[in-house]
Structure formats: C-alpha cells, structure tokens
Image: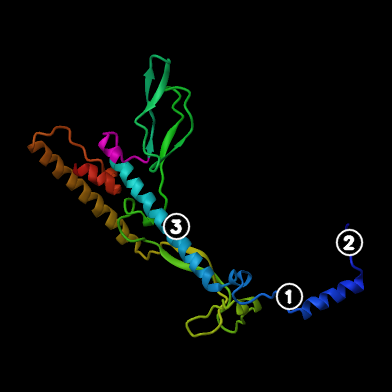
Amino acid sequence: MLKPPPKAGEERKMSTASQKDGRKTPRLSAQSPSFQKFDPMQKKDLLAQERENQERAKRDAEDERQREMEEFKKSGYSTTSNVIMPAYKHDDILDCDREINIPPKSQYIDLGWDENAETKRKHYRRFFNDELENVKTVLAIASPFQTYEIKKGQTRGAKAGFFASLMNEVKEDESGQVSTEELMGKFKAVIEVEVKEEKEKYFQDKEELFREMQEALKSLASSRGIANFELDLDLLETIEGREELED
C-alpha cells in the first residue's frame, strides 16, 4: 500500500531526526568544481593555451601556403600578378569548357563565375592572412608605420571593483597602483617631415638613375646577343618579382 505524505509537523520532526542521526547537509568547499571554475589562474592558463593554438595554426597555414606556392612554381604557371584570369580547355566529350591550371587556394581566392571560356567574369585575387606590413614578400623591411595604442580607463586614483577583488584579478600599473586601462585598438600612421625642393630633386635624381640603369642593362644584353631587352620595373616591387627577374 502507498503511504500518505507526511504532514508539515511530521516532516519537520523527520528533518530534525535525520540531523540527530549524524547526517549533515552537504556544503560547498574550496575544492568543489563550483569554485574551481572561477579560478583566475585556470582562466589565464586557458587563455595562454588558446593563444598557443592560434600561433600553431598560423604557422601551419603559412607552411601549407609556402608548399602550395612551390608546387605552383614547379608547374610552370607561377606568376607575380595579384590578379589571375582562369584558363580553360574544351572538353570534346561533354562539349563544355573545363578550367585548368587552378592557382593554389591558400594564395588566391576565386571571385565571380564563368558560364564558358568567353564570359571573362571569373578571376582570382591574391590574399594574405596577416597585415601587409608583416608579410615579408610584400614588405621586406620593418613596418614604416608609427603605431600608437588607443586606451580607455584610469591608472591613478582608480579603485578595484568588488568582483575583481573577489576573483583576484585586480590589474596594477608599474608603480603598483590599481589600473582600469583597456586596450581598445591601435592608430597607425606614416609621419614624414620633408622639404618640398629637396623631395622634387630626390625624385629627379631617382628617375635619372633608373634611366641610366636601363641603358646600361640594354647595352649589356646587346653585347650578350640578347635582342629587344626590356626591364619591367614593376617586377621589382615584390620579392617574388625580383626572384623571377634573377631567374
């Protein structure tokens, strides 16, 4: 038979009796998982692990990018152009145009779509996974930009918040005072101080030097039996172009 539920007074007596029997209500301790998930050191370790995973993924992507670029060069269809038009070959069996010599996807992104080889709508554009000033193939020298950090917050006279004190995440500056500063972004700019007359003379001298270099190279090529030698100065803008010119 089912027992009827105890009355309010009986339930209180039963609760009191259970405490007298030595059974206690469980309490959260410092070792409880409910407390451990708020451990600030564990949070820092997870953030450091996430940064390490991102750096590893970035290195792997760069290695894959270099490998595919080397294979593209060996195929004989490598180019220094940032924009590549697709090449097609007609399939006589299916009576359609099939794309051939597709650039590596780690280097170029395809945009548009062609109905056939005559559409000329689809093209490939080179892309990079990092800022251009960090890409050595684009800018071999250090970044020409002056960088200034944009912050918000307070460094002197600031007070630590309740939760920051509770979680032991109070930030301090170099002097040991409480800091609420946060990095919001970066401002990059190129600041130049120049004299107009000197700048004009610089470009005139530069143009004259390039003209003399081209004449000297044409003369050298003619002496080696190379006819109609032309120097494309645009190839000198990138490291890949200079490597191709050297080859």
Q: Position of residue 117 (x, y in %)?
A: 42, 23
Which residue does the numbered mark 2 point to in the structure image? 3
Residue at position x 19%, y 41% from top?
247
Residue 201, given in percent of the width and then of the height, sits at 28, 57
For disc 1, the neighbor class at 10 Å (few under 14, some 14 to 19, many from 20) is few
- In the depicted structure, whether residue 51 falls above or below residue 165: above
Q: Quadrant of residue 91?
A: top left
Residue plotted at (16% across, 43% down): 215
Secondary structure at numbered mark 2: loop
Q: Nearer the viewer, residue 174 or 122?
A: 174
Sequence-wise, the earlier of marks 1 and 2 is: 2
* Residue placed under numbered mark 1 in the picture: 25
Q: Nearer the viewer, residue 163 or 108?
A: 163
The majority secondary structure of the magenta stretch comes to loop
Q: Assign a secondary structure to mark 1.
A: loop
Q: Position of residue 168 (x, y in %)?
A: 57, 78
Asked where in the image residue 162 lies, by quadrant, the reply is bottom right
Residue type of the residue flagged with mark 3: Gln
In the rendered structure, the answer to whether residue 99 lies left or right of residue 67 reads: right
Which residue corresponds to mark 3? 54
